[in-house]
Image (spheres, rainbow, N blue to C red):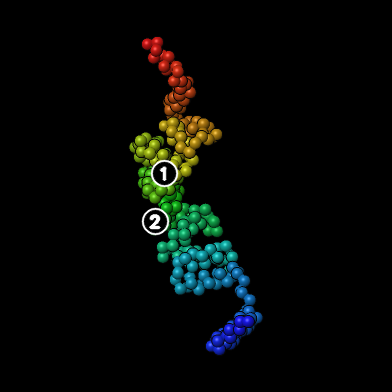
Amino acid sequence: MKKKRAIPAIYLHLAVPLIIILALLLVYRVFALVTEPPPVPYTWERTVANFKVRAEQGHPVAQFYLGNGYLTGHGIEKDLDKALTYYEMASEQGEPRATLRLATLYERGDSVKRNLPEAVRYLRRAMEGGDLRSTVKLARFHELGLGTEKDLGKARFFYGLASAGGDPYSLESGAYLDFTGFGTPPDPANAVSLYRDSALRGNRESRFALAVITGEEIGGGDGELAKFCLAFQRHLGNLETLERLSERKETEESKEPEAPGDAAAEGSKT
């Protein structure tokens, strides 16, 4: 009968301290769970208070969000004057959202008296900071004469800046001005190029316009395509283009692909 090997004494000496340490860790964890205060619930007041501390330290992002709080009254008493103050502070430090928010408030007359020249001033500041949305809106203001003198040349220029940044709406607007010759000499070739680029970026109006002008369709068929094409050409007065497209469509529909057998038969006759 084999004798059981005895556990070395050194293992017993190491096991006892290890067990004691694990027991102490377990007791500490239980004590921590029992005495730990409950988590502070999320509140708008707590968030706004944090933004206020950071805003007073000069952080433009915190100033922008604190302005939002004063504007909407979330987590803090609504105060329009303070909202405008913090928006202005953030805007002066280059926060584009604050600048665009000021422009939008003055454009719409939302919570402030409508002031389109002031909106244009803030749009220019945001544009100079590289904000693409402000560039688009500034082009629109010059196109319609909102808050500034109507200038289709400047509108075309600002649309060009925005389209260089890849904005599909600006590409479409610039193409329209090129095609119609508003503000600049007509440039149909460049208009088609801009329409195509905008259509490839998903702009629906550009896809329709491209189909009207060149017959090229990007993105597949659309049930509203014919209606839009007709309205678009009537708006521009391009009845000749409509007739040409109609004739081309009829010609293409009348053509039927020849079967290989038919072609061979004709060859044998000759």
The residue that label 2 is drawn on is: 130
Q: For the point 53% across and 58% down, which residue is it?
A: 112
Label 1's element?
helix
What number is the disc on residue 171? 1
Q: Nearer the viewer, residue 96 or 237?
A: 96
How packed mark 1 is, by other alpha carbons closer than 10 Å (few <14, some 14-19, many 20 or more), is many
Q: Nearer the viewer, residue 251 or 96?
A: 251
Where is residue 220 shown, x and y percent of the image? Answer: 49, 36
Where is residue 20 shown, x and y percent of the image? Answer: 59, 86
Q: Is residue 149 visible?
A: no
Please state, as top left, top right, bottom left or bottom right, where the C terminus lies in the image. top left
Identify the residue at the far right of this view. 34
Q: Is residue 112 visible?
A: yes
Residue 39 occupies quadrant: bottom right
Q: Amino acid at mark 1?
A: Leu
The answer to which of marks 1 and 2 sits earlier in the sequence is: 2
Q: Report whether 84 appears left or right of 149.
A: right
* Cα distance between the residues tagged 1 and 2: 17 Å
